[in-house]
């Protein structure tokens, strides 16, 4: 019985990919918090899509691979998903790319040879001393050589295309003998945005796939590593107000997430402050608060009484930053106070004070 349990335990351990058993993911991604987008609107586009402009942004994604799986990483995939339903993807790069391990075409030679041999012999004898012998032979050889150049087989090195009805784009990169998946990848994206647009947010999802053998000599198995997701703010290059609003949104969102994480235990054990609720909770424990965002949005006064003050303050600071960003997204008219806010921050420096999540 003990031997059977040991065997089952060993099989279960071997059934897990070695990369999954490590403390952290062997493939780490990194993306910046802010991305400027430059106006590249053409007269042709203005005539075709009145009320919209073209903006180009370069998105830089860094990939760091653990040396233990450097030869096992076979694929990385990046998804760029825009949060604004009015923004469309117009163009992107790199496009789908095919590569060959050969520098040029492959030459193929077809050789055909024809060889004909013939011999005719005649012998006539009247007796042992009188007679005649004759023979006739011929040989013909013909050779044909045909040389042709054929295109080498191409393998997929990179693939890209739109998703979500044009409101997002994906990029997939395969490892080849001529490319590496580690390092910096530059993605170029052209957006069609409303004329009143100046700032917004998007999600970046990064995935990696490795191929490893469970045991030496056994067939290899493909494993998808855990997904990494980032929220990135976009703003129109040269617009200081939009840059400030985008920076503030990312800053307050990060602070809100960190505050919820810091007070998670206190939020879980928090009870209402009224004496009646406290006495009631001795007999019947209070119900869990649940989703903090939904609770604050649905019952702000009640939730503010239940939650720690720093949590409530961080929530409303984040909501204020989100409201300012919505005013720059082109979905609703700009706030009336934008002119005063632009004047207030016109000469202020732009800085980001964030900690890694």
Image: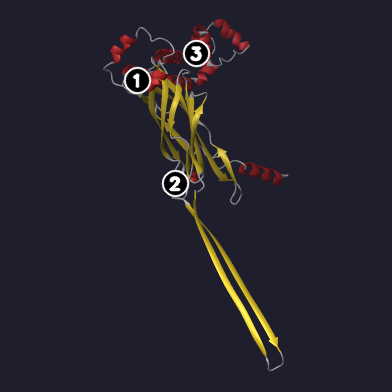
Q: Which numbered tag is attached to residue 307? A: 3
Above or below, 72 against 262 in this view is below
Which residue is found at the position 46% from the left and 42% from the top?
A: 66
Q: Which numbered tag is attached to residue 211? A: none
Q: Is residue 172 visible?
A: no
Above or below, 128 against 181 in this view is below
The residue furthest right is 1
Query: Which badge, 2 or 1, comes first in the chain's sequence?
Result: 2
Alpha carbon distance from label 2 to label 1:
39 Å
Quarter placement of the N terminus:
top right
Query: Which badge, 3 or 1, comes first in the chain's sequence?
Result: 1
Q: Which residue is mark 2?
A: 178
Q: Which residue is mark 1?
A: 243
Image quarter of residue 353: top left
Which residue is found at the position 55% from the left and 6% from the top?
A: 275
Disc 2, disc 1: CB below 8 Å? no
């Amino acid at each position: 019985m003990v031997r059977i349990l040991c065997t089952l335990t060993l099989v279960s351990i071997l059934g897990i990919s070695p990369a999954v058993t490590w403390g952290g993911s062997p493939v780490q991604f990194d993306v910046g918090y802010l991305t400027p987008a430059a106006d590249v609107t053409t007269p042709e586009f203005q005539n075709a899509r009145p009320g919209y402009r073209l903006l180009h942004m370069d998105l830089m994604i860094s990939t760091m691979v653990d040396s233990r799986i450097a030869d096992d990483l076979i694929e990385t995939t990046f998804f760029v998903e825009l949060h604004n339903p009015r923004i469309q993807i117009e163009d992107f790069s790199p496009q789908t790319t095919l590569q060959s391990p050969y520098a040029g075409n492959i030459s193929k030679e077809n050789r055909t040879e024809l060889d004909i041999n013939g011999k005719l012999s005649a012998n006539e004898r009247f007796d042992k001393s009188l007679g005649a012998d004759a023979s006739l032979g011929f040989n013909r050889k013909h050779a044909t050589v045909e040389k042709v150049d054929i295109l080498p087989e191409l393998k997929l090195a990179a693939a890209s295309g739109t998703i979500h009805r044009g409101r997002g784009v994906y990029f997939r990169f395969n490892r080849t003998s001529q490319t590496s998946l580690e390092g910096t990848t530059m993605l170029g994206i052209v957006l069609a945005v409303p004329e009143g647009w100046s700032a917004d947010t998007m999600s970046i999802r990064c995935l990696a796939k490795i191929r490893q053998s469970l045991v030496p000599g056994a067939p290899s198995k493909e494993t998808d590593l855990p997904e990494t997701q980032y929220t990135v703010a976009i703003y129109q290059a040269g617009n200081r107000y939009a840059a400030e609003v985008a920076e503030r949104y990312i800053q307050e969102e990060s602070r809100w997430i960190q505050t919820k994480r810091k007070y998670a235990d206190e939020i879980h054990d928090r009870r209402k402050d009224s004496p009646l609720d406290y006495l009631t909770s001795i007999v019947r424990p209070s119900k869990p608060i649940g989703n903090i965002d939904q609770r604050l949005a649905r019952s702000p006064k009640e939730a503010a009484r239940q939650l720690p003050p720093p949590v409530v303050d961080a929530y409303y600071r984040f909501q204020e930053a989100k409201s300012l960003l919505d005013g720059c997204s082109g979905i609703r008219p700009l706030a009336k106070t934008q002119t005063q806010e632009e004047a207030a921050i016109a000469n202020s420096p732009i800085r980001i004070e964030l900690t890694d999540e």
